[in-house]
Image: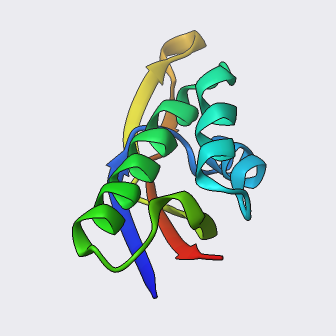
């Protein structure tokens, strides 16, 4: 049995979010929440919120024991990019691409 939670259109680049996702992949939920709580990155807060949503989904199904949950898969996919322009020298402009992410967390029981 698996439960999942998805957060879409989060304003953090996928590369930065994948660094944090690699820290908690395969860990127990309690250990993962502790790691995310004490890590200083912005994406930790977003992944923590998604992970808590998946745990709440597991509680509401009433078929899973919350104490035995672990992160089976966690994926960070690329969302749409915001395109912005920044002024440069001699009247030119350069393009700035601001990334967004879709985070998917799948929990399972041991």
Image coordinates for residue 16, horizontal then vertical, percent: 66, 41
Front residue of this view, candidates 80 and 84: 80
Question: At 73% from the left edge and 64% from the top edge, which residue is drawn?
Answer: 26
Q: Quadrant of the C terminus?
A: bottom right
Image coordinates for residue 84, horizontal then vertical, percent: 38, 33
Label count reads 0
Front residue of this view, candidates 48 and 91: 48
Applied colour scheme: rainbow
Q: Which of the 4 image quarters holds residue 2?
A: bottom left
In the displayed image of the protein, which residue is found farthest to the bottom? 1
Image coordinates for residue 39, horizontal then vertical, percent: 68, 24
For residue 98, say whether it is visible.
Answer: no
In the displayed image of the protein, which residue is found farthest to the top? 89
Q: Which of the 4 image quarters holds residue 8?
A: bottom left
Left or right relative to 10: residue 33: right
Front residue of this view, candidates 33 and 46: 33
Q: Judge whether 38 appears above or below 29 on screen.
A: above
For residue 21, say whether it is visible.
Answer: yes
Question: At 57% from the left edge and 76% from the top edge, which residue is drawn?
Answer: 109
Q: Judge whether 60 appears above or below 24 on screen.
A: below
Image coordinates for residue 90, horizontal then vertical, percent: 56, 12
Question: At 46% from the left edge and 51% from the top edge, which residue is drawn?
Answer: 51
Question: At 50% from the left edge and 36% from the top edge, which residue is drawn?
Answer: 95
Q: Judge whether 24 appears above or below 65 on screen.
A: above
């Amino acid at each position: 049995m698996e439960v999942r939670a998805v957060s879409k259109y989060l304003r953090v680049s996928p590369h930065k979010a994948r660094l944090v996702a690699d820290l908690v992949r395969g860990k127990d939920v309690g250990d993962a929440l502790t790691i995310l709580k004490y890590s200083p990155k912005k994406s930790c807060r977003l992944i923590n919120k998604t992970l808590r949503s998946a745990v709440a989904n597991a509680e509401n199904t009433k078929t899973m024991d919350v104490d035995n949950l672990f992160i089976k898969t966690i994926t960070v996919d690329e969302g749409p990019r915001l395109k912005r322009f920044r002024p440069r020298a001699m009247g030119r402009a350069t393009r700035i691409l601001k990334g967004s992410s879709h985070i998917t967390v799948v929990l399972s029981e041991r």
